[in-house]
Amino acid sequence: MSEESILIVEDEKDIQELVRYNLSKEGYRVTCADSGEAGLKSVQSQHPDLVILDLMLPGVDGLEVCRRMKTDLATAHIPIIMLTAKGDESDIVVGLEMGADDYVTKPFSLKVFLTRVRAVLRRSKSEPPGESEEEILRFSELVIHPGRHEVFVDEKPVALTFTEFFILKYLATRPGWVFTRLQIVQAIRGDGYSTSERSVDFQIVGLRKKLEGAARYIETVRGVGYRFKE
């Protein structure tokens, strides 16, 4: 039986109940909020392990909820899966750049949805049991500490989502190697994970913005994928 807590922020009652029922059946502790304002209050008071966030909400919309969560140090670590209509690609891009960890388009497959929930929670809980000083990745002004999930640029901490961190670490552990988008998806989320390879591009955009000057280490190899500059 799972002990993770999940907050659903969704104003459509049918979808909210469908998601709540299926997550509860999987053993998660589930609470719900009907608006962005209520969702933010629940996040602050409950600190759930995961937030399922609809983008089209009355009042404060999902993108603003995401922005406020990711700019607040007390809640920035909480992973977010966005729920969005299929045509809202621009919103998906903005949401991922703000720090959302994944997205699910409506209408969605419950099997795929639950797989993504498990994947995000697994990534958020994973941490190596121990790590020596030599295993810390250092590249001039950029320092990556895998065990602590910490990144520093010019000795200043950089707040990355779990997905952004794993992409950076994956590339940085093999400087000079070129990886396709599919290889990156499979390395981070496992084989058979149903997601668009284009989501890797969205994550890279957000990662580069946060790294600022150190973004020069992440190179695009046209027609292939990405590599970490040696």
Image: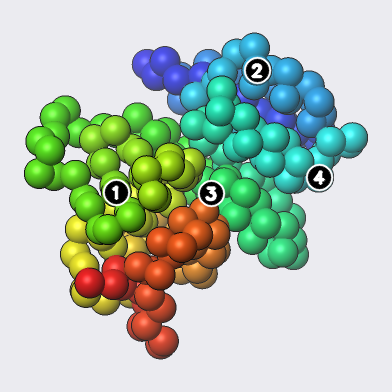
Q: Nearer the viewer, mark 4 or mark 2?
A: 2
Return the disc, 4 or 1, that comes first in the chain's sequence: 4
Label at residue 44: 2
In the image, what residue occupies the spot 35% across and 30% down?
A: 125
Number of marks present in the image shown: 4
Residue at mark 1: 143
Give, as a three-letter code, the residue at label 3.
Asp
Asked if disc 1 and disc 2 are in contact, CB closer than 8 Å, the reply is no
Instruction: Confirm whether residue 188 shows in the render.
Output: no
Neighbor class of circle 3 (other Cα within 10 Å; few <14, some 14-19, many 20+) is many
Nearer-the-camera pick, 9 or 208: 208
Amino acid found under the numbered disc labelled 1: Val
Identify the element where label 4 is drawn: loop
Res 70 seen here: yes
Where is the N terminus found, in terms of image quarters?
Answer: top left
Left or right position of 92 against 159: right
Q: Nearer the viewer, mark 1 or mark 2?
A: 1
Q: Earlier in the sequence, mark 1 or mark 3?
A: 3
Q: Which label number is shown at residue 102?
A: 3
Circle 4 residues within 10 Å: few <14, some 14–19, many ≥20:
some
Residue that protrudes farthest toward the top in the picture: 45
Check whether the beta carbons of the residues at disc 4 and disc 3 lie within 8 A of each other. Answer: no
Q: Which residue is mark 4?
A: 56
Residue 44 position by quadrant: top right
Q: CA distance from mark 1 to mark 3?
A: 25 Å
Mark 2 secondary-structure assignment: helix
Q: Earlier in the sequence, mark 3 or mark 2?
A: 2
Q: Choose between 90 and 98: the one closer to the eye.
A: 98
